[in-house]
Image: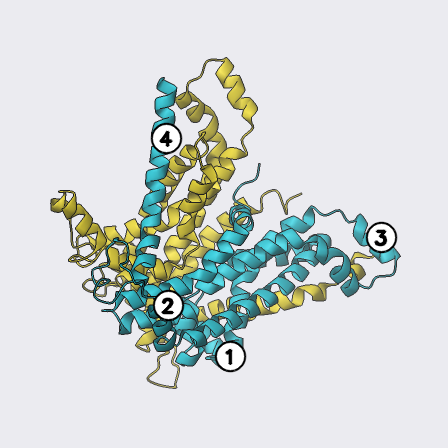
Amino acid sequence: MNKKKVYPIYFVFGALLLYIVLFVIPSLIGIAYSFTDWSSYSDKLNFVGLDNFKLVFSSDENYMAIIKNTLKFTFITTILKNVLGLVLALLLTKSIKFLNFHRGIMFMPSILSTLIIGMIFKSILDPSGGLLNTFLHSVGLGFLAGKWLVSSELAFGSVMAVDIWRGTGYIMTILIAGILSISTTYYEAASIDGANAYQKFRYITFPLLLPTLATTTVLNIIYGLKVFDMIYALTNGGPGKTTTEVLYTAVFKKFATGQYAVGTALSTVMFLFMVVIGVFMIKIMTKDEVVE
Amino acid sequence: MKKRLYTILRNSIAWLISIISLVPLFLIIFNSLKTSISASDMNLSFPQFPLQFSNFALVIEKGKLFQSFINSSIYTVGSVVVCCLFSSMAAYVLSRNRTKLSKVIYLFIVLGITMPMNYVALVKVMMMLHLNNTRLGIVLLYAAMQIPFSVFLLYSFISKIPTELDEAGIIDGCKPIRLFISIVFPLLKPAVATVIVLTFLNNWNEFVSPLYFLSSSTKWPMTLSVYNFFGMYFKDWNLICADIVMTSIPVILIYLLGQKHIVSGMTAGAVKG
């Protein structure tokens, strides 16, 4: 049969058109605009070469701190979500009563709006009347109570903690699916050989789970670099100038103040990070699909 | 004996973590039913009777929730329809007719799963297309953002459907569109259900794009209006909580109804046995 006739290429046009116009083109013209002095103050566009990038990477400005924050946020949340997610996944693949209930509850934070979670935690972490400090005082651990989101020492850690609370259930769910896909015959063989629980984990579960862990790592990295809602709702980059400022919140501030060129230059920096990670990600996700 | 101890320990840890996960939810529900004064310190005590159901009515009126509920529904339903239709058509042809070109197109689209949006430049594109600050613009943008992952999900699903059915359809004289609509699409139901549920959740929760592209508050979706409400009534936690509850109800309902699809969709691609 004639595949070209039966599966006409115009079926692809709708998706491709929307994707190119609203996704690819903005990224490309964004790169072009980052070499200009585009702003809301003047209608004229001038070519300024690498000036915006020089500004972004100069030590006088605080953009480097913002990039560093983004990378730090990504690195730490990725590791902790993976570790905690793995612990939870191991816990919830054992014989436990109401297993599905627990899985469902722990997954729930991942489906709620990140913005709303941020708002809820803004109240919980309130230094004076927030639930966390009130609780710590009431159980006699008052010395642990802190100014979670308002002090410059604790803010970054608090934001990451909330994000880890939000994201671990999702990682856990993926890892549970990974663990359940491991054939039970390995464990049976190991039992016959007299392996204990740790050895089974070390020599069966962990190695066979590595591809899944690679995927969760990449997913976390992508999320971490793009994080916006959570930080916007919790601290909006504060306290101070850059304590918790990350790339996307900085881009939004540049947009709001009309400094479009700097905003799009920051986006371009992020775009370059992502292309590298993205290609790696797609290789993992499509490995036994496209290559025949 | 030791084994039983472990079982008890495991169960208690699971309960402890589940309870910690539920605390914020109860906090919001309890406080949405309190008076402004008793909700002011946002504690976990059970609301006193009479329960303040009037908070909800007040929020709907003050926060213009009805309008933003309609907006959110238009954006979400509209983008779900557009995304499902376009993605399934594209995934179908790309998966069935595997030429060099179609593989390149597929990888090109799927790369969008990871790519960041350049919102600043997107504003420019939206203005050029007269889509800025319009409902249609948001619907198309939401659909575009979800297309890469949807195509990815549907593509691998379609690859597993045998082509014999297509051939039978062709012998009976089906044209391509008819073949897709009456033979292939019905077979895609499980994958399309997953796409619908995931697209719904992501787009209902979407906050960044309306922040950039919708300047008029009458077009705001619920996420944006709840945030705005949060800024205006930051003293009245009972009202904020009521607003949060109402914004989250659709998401939680969808989660309870479509849990199976969400988990299978969100873990697709991550786990290949």
Chain that is cyan in the image? B
Can residue A34 be seen by looking at this rendering? Answer: no
Q: Which amino acid type is marked by label 3?
A: Ala
Q: Mark 3 or mark 4, which is nearer to you?
A: 4
Q: How far across and how far down the image is residue B104, in percent?
A: 63, 56
Colour representing chain A: yellow
Q: Mark 2 or mark 4, which is nearer to you?
A: 4
Q: Look at mark 4 in the image and give the residue it sits on.
A: B10
Q: Which amino acid type is marked by label 1?
A: Leu
Q: Which subunit holds the residue at mark 4?
A: B
Q: Look at mark 1 in the image and give the residue it sits on.
A: B131
Is there a contact, CB below 8 Å, between mark 1 and mark 3? no
Q: Earlier in the sequence, mark 1 or mark 4?
A: 4
Q: Look at mark 2 in the image and give the residue it sits on.
A: A265
Q: Mark 1 or mark 3, which is nearer to you?
A: 3
Q: Which amino acid type is marked by label 4?
A: Arg
